[in-house]
Image (spheres, grey):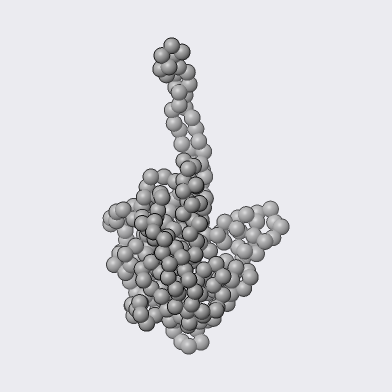
């Protein structure tokens, strides 16, 4: 689906402020009471909050702060796409995937790169979904952080040895991003989750009512996971790849309050998991 992301990632990581050696991502995953997902009998549709439409509308406006809407919309959009790839990588069947998910119900090819950097391809199941992945992502906080380093200021002309040093200050914008993923089974045949409710304002993604995130009377929960990441990276795909791979790492075995350590480049790979005290 997005094999281009590997090349863009490696180009982006040439910037010292875009990537770091490791990310420490606190996650909290809880098992629900609903019937677990079957890899043979269930089909998953990943849906995003209806709030996305507000951000897309702001992005398309002539307002001076249109870029703020674009950043928030991109976080939600990439969370949806990366969640699909992670679930596909785990061996689950999906429908209505990709950038133009619509409500086609038709099977189609999905391409992705797994955590080892291997190109993967598979066909989605298509048809009516039985399980829904409610995905939401938010920008929790933005702040400026100063990094101070020593740099050579002057040297001995005869030997080249440094004789004086000076401080170099870099100011970097840091973003704390949160994501939540709920795997649920709808209650009732007329549940609005079964309706895609896609439009141009949702960039053709299927949406769910914003109230459904807290109002759990509309579904039975199979799994609920949240995670946060603080980074200077600005690429939403880069950020959401880390978050989705952490929350869904070894699903459904990794449950409870944990701290995930990921190597940031060139692939989104979990290297250690510890209890987060």
Q: Is residue 66 left or right of residue 255?
A: right
Residue at point 57% right, 56% down?
71
Split into 4 quadrants, where in the image is the C terminus?
Answer: bottom left
> Can you give x and y, in whole percent of width and height, for residue 88 in the image?
40, 69
Q: In the current view of this chain or complex, which residue is farthest to the right?
A: 62
Location of residue 67 (image quadrant): bottom right
Q: In the current view of this chain or complex, which residue is farthest to the bottom?
A: 189
Location of residue 104 (image quadrant): bottom right
**154, 95: nearer the viewer:** 95
Q: Is residue 175 visible?
A: no
Total numbered labels placed on residues in the image: 0
**237, 11: nearer the viewer:** 11
Q: Is residue 89 visible?
A: yes
> Can you give x and y, in whole percent of width and height, for residue 183 in the image?
41, 73
Residue at point 37% right, 82% down?
41
> Can you give x and y, in whole percent of width and height, for residue 137 in the image?
49, 62
> Can you give x and y, in whole percent of width and height, for residue 130 in the image?
43, 81
Residue at point 44% right, 14% down?
156
Residue at point 44% right, 63% down?
112
**106, 144: nearer the viewer:** 106
């Amino acid at each position: 689906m997005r094999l281009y992301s590997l090349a863009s990632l490696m180009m982006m990581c040439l910037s010292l402020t875009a990537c770091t050696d490791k990310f420490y991502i606190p996650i909290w995953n809880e098992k629900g009471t609903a019937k677990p997902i079957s890899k043979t009998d269930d089909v998953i549709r990943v849906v995003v909050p209806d709030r996305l439409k507000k951000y897309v509308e702001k992005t398309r406006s002539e307002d001076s702060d249109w870029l703020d809407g674009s950043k928030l919309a991109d976080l939600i959009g990439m969370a949806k796409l990366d969640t699909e790839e992670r679930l596909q990588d785990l061996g689950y069947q999906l429908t209505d995937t990709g950038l133009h998910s619509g409500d086609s119900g038709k099977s189609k090819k999905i391409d992705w790169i797994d955590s080892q950097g291997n190109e993967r391809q598979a066909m989605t199941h298509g048809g009516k979904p039985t399980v829904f992945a409610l995905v939401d992502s938010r920008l929790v906080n933005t702040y400026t952080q100063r990094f101070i380093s020593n740099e050579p200021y002057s040297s001995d002309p005869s030997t080249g040895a440094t004789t004086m040093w000076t401080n170099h200050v870099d100011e970097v914008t840091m973003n704390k991003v949160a994501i939540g993923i709920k795997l649920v089974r709808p209650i009732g045949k007329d549940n609005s989750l079964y309706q895609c409710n896609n439009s141009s304002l949702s960039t053709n993604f299927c949406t769910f009512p914003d109230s459904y995130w807290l109002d759990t009377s509309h579904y039975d929960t199979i799994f609920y996971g949240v995670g946060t990441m603080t980074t200077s990276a600005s690429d939403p795909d880069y950020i959401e790849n880390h978050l989705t791979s952490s929350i869904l790492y070894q699903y459904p075995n990794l449950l409870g309050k944990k701290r995930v350590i990921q190597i940031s480049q060139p692939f989104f790979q979990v290297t250690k998991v510890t209890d987060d005290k």
